[in-house]
Amino acid sequence: MPETYDAIVIGAGHNGLVNAAYLAKAGKKVLVLERRPVIGGASVTEEVFPGFKFSVFSYVVSLFRPEIVRDLQLTRHGLTILPLESTLTPLPDGDRLYRDADHYRAMREIARFSRRDADAYEDYSRSMYFMAKAVKYILGVVPPDPTSLHPRDIGELLRLARHFLGLGEEQLFTLARLMTMSSADFLERWFESEPLKATLSASGIIGTFLGPRSPGTAYVLLHHYMGEIDGVFRSWGFQKGGTGGLAQAVALAAQSYGVEIRTEAPVNQVLLKDGRATGVVLENGDELHARRVVSSLDPKQTFLKLVDPAQLPDELVADIQRFNIRGSSGKVNLALDAAPEFACWPGNGPHLRGAISISPSTDYIERAFDEAKYGDFSHRPYIDVVFPSMIDPEMAPPGKYVMSCFVQYAPYRLRSGNWDEKREAFGDAVVNTLGEYIPNLKNIILHRQVLTPLDIERMTGLSEGNIFQGELSLWQLFFLRPAAGFAQYRTPLRDYYQCGSGAHPGGGITGAPGRLAALEILRDWKS
Amino acid sequence: MKGVPAKQAYDVIIIGAGHNGLVAAAYLARAHLRVLVLERREVLGGAAATEAIFPGYRVDTGSFSAGSFLPRLVQELNLAQHSLEFLEGPAWAHALQLDGRGLTFWRDVSRSQAEIEQFSPKDAAKYPAYLEELRRHARLLQATWTMIPPHIPETRWSELLSWTPIGWQLRRQGKRAMMEFTRALPMPAADYLDERFESQALKGALASASAFGGLLSPGAAGTALMLFYQAIGAGPGAAWALRSVRGGTGRLSEALAKAAQAHGAEVCLESGVRRVWLQDGRAAGVSLESGEQLSARVVVSNAGPGQTFFGLVGAEHLPVRFVRELKNIKYRGGAGRVALALADLPDFPGVSGAGKEERLSGRILLAPGLEYLEKAADAAKFGRLPDNLPLEAAIPTILDASLAPPGRHLMLVNVQYTPYRLVEGDWEARRDELGRRVVETLETYAPGFSRLVLDWRAWTPLDMERIFGLTEGSHSHGEMGLDQLLFMRPVPGYGQYRTPIHGLYLCSAGTHPGGGVTGAPGYNATRAVLQDLSRQTGVVPGRPD
């Protein structure tokens, strides 16, 4: 049987593409197989309504690893991040909290709510900057197995211990808190004003099925601080042409190294022979052969769907079955006929080129969570809004706008009814909530796309529509992600690997799992 | 015990005669130090006290279980000699269900399985393995109880070395068990139980141990750890270390006081401390509310961390960073208490006949499902009393008739998820509501209950603070959250019972390992004191026996 490819990567999401590019750059012949007609996975731009382009799912970029941008020369292939410089928190009473890149202006604005908070903001920003820098280290590390006596694992554990103990007392304690506290409690150590605390704490709930008062969310908060664009920490940006542009850039880079990408080629099964992967079977029955197979799909699909679980150790199957991958968010994409008018900021303004956060208070978000906890969507949800066409006019026809709304909470499992029945009610809840802050919104909506977690699952294949391929809970991180003993991108089946966000360091458009998996695969190739 | 201190100078003055203060007193006196214990109240024991609330009754006003008290302390201090006797019935809990059924957890595992069988045969089959796993985790955790947390990040080799047996114990369990333990520590109790069982009746009852008198819901990360914590000392057939003391928990405190006195310690009641006085920046003694001044080489505070430093020392004597950390301690007490004098045993449907007393001989739990608890916690976090109260009760008179007049019974009820901070009204005005709600709730599960009530008394979290000095009503002098354990308890950098004030030590539940009638904080604090004294003088205080 002729071996056509060195490696087949399943899924052309950003991690699959990064993985393929690294493998091909090392001289391997790589084929990427994508189920959908477009590449990108959850990083796609689609013209959902004529003339209106949307970053359908993932909509902002920050966490993408700079070393990948360098290694794959992504800027040459079209990676252009436009900065998203401000965050506006409109308040129900018509007031607002507006923070932009000008640190002193932000402090003055915060001082309107609390002078103490304005002073603390400086400290807080500095502290988080150091923490993110310190912890960023683990984004580039293959998690060592703490139960292993292999010199490589022990060496890495010692390096980690030295790294973290070397941080100094104060930083170490802050880190310990970030790993254990709720984002609300963590922020309450610094701040007292509600709009600021709530807006900051929202970073702690994204992609999780936890509320701002749930312990463990401070880590998710930190996860979102590890972003870096062009050496600027904690900056968020918007890829020109939408998030799909990022996947395109990686795809172009991959192709420049010789990667072949095939769309509309859904994989049905991984081919196994004597306990090792030898290729894949497509849904149309075609067999493709490769020396190594890499899955960028989430752990549930990688271990329970693409291969027969009977081929895997029972313990691993049990671990993957209990892996928490609860979808908790939805997305509403709106095509607008005119510019939105905020009650707190009428007319055009810089706020429209930044993020809008519907997070008036911590209790507001916590209540949204409480509702979702028992299987209903939040009727007054947390919403993170951007207007991509304000930053990149090519996203919409002249004079018209696109609006992207990330919504939490929308639990995948509803207690009563199903998402196909409740989709529009959910969309209405989002529009109604936004309407309280943007009075003209209802009159300017031309089209509306409501994506429930079920839709996200159906379209992208992400199980339960979980955007992180598994929650970033403390017991699902690092050497426990996705399962103890299999956090080093390998699987119990020889030549079968995982490279999705379900592996360390987790979700967000980081590219890190794809890269680290490629480095491990290449290491196996050498030995 | 009442009255005035005999001397003016002591080696050690202990502030507070809670069980931890008394453990410290006994050990320090045993090491030939002159020890004085000062208690503000007229009764011994702090939150481990028994008082005559209703005529003829002996009521545990604090904890009504001492199941996790360290066995080594009982032995080393010869507490049995001082008439300490633990009692446990054939059942460790009986869980009331919404549909009127009950689920009894017997200490006999197969008998429990037969009960669980009625709710889920699958769960019944898994129950023994669950208890075994819990025991394994509990054993590991218990080993850490008598350890002084390492100083981080400047850990000394000797400290690390002292932890190696625990590391070895973990290792020996094998890779899988090691990972399972590591994974379980930060998990929510709800997730942990959901992974193992399907029956809400079973999961609710087991999860009710995770609240630990605080506001953390079973869905909060880190509460699985509380399941293991509560299982320490539980014995083979139980998931929760529930044992009472003959004569009331106060008897344990009395036994400790007697042991301390036998070694020469003095214990003075109604002797509130107003201030720890400092000389050249170190603790030199205390001044009493009566104005008297007493000097000591070492002062050990059994009061909570906030009360010790803000109430007795003064922030002006402390490093700024330390003060900031103290202010940030989360207390968040979340339990009210109702004591009921009953004319007879209540009638729960399905609990009758000869087996009635047996079934009700442990905790009586009202926690019929995880969601029941979660919703209660939701209400409490917003400062509301839950619509449906989760209860953790006991009728101690079943095992010990001496606690009530002949034929009568006493029922003690912990009302879980009772917030310290109310969004409406205040506890002074709403105290009776707490008692009324408990009686109403029990009436629905045991029709006719209210007719049995001869007398009752309620303690709100605010009362706990005022009477027992428990800040925000927190039984454990600080929430038992992941961020406030081990070297982070009471505050990061001061997890070794020592404080920024030389000669001042902490020994309350606000230090490692935390709440419960364990004696561990008192025991560990003693070791820190003795280490430091021998370092100063070069003489190791004597160890008799």
Image (tube, coloured by chain):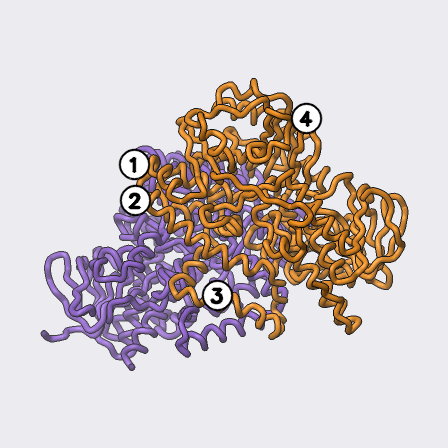
Chain colours: A purple, B orange
Residue B7 placement: quadrant: bottom right
Across and down, in percent, residue B234 comes to 51, 48
Which of pointers 1 and 3 indicates the residue nearer the eye? 3
Q: Mark 1 — on which chain does it sit?
A: A
Dot 1 or dot 2, earlier in sequence: 1
Discs 1, 2 touching: Cβ within 8 Å? yes
List the residue tagged with mark 2: A454
SS class of the residue under badge 1? loop
Whether marks 1 and 3 lie on the same chain: no
- At label 1, counting other C-alpha atoms closer than 10 Å, the crowd grade (few under 14, some 14-19, many 20 or more) is few
List the residue tagged with mark 4: B429
Q: B237 left or right of B439?
A: left
Dot 4 or dot 3, earlier in sequence: 3
Q: CA distance from mark 1 to mark 3?
A: 49 Å
Discs 2, 3 touching: Cβ within 8 Å? no
At label 3, which amino acid type do we have? Gln
Mark drawn on residue B169? 3
Work out which residue is located at the far bottom of the displayed protein and give it.
A526
Whether marks 4 and 3 lie on the same chain: yes
Residue at image point 41% right, 46% down:
B193
Q: B329 left or right of A451?
A: right
Q: CA distance from mark 2 to mark 4?
A: 49 Å
Whether marks 1 and 2 lie on the same chain: yes
List the residue tagged with mark 1: A418
SS class of the residue under badge 4? helix
Discs 4, 3 touching: Cβ within 8 Å? no
Of the pair A61 and B505, the residue shown nearer to us: B505
Residue B176 visible, this orientation: yes
At label 2, which amino acid type do we have? Leu
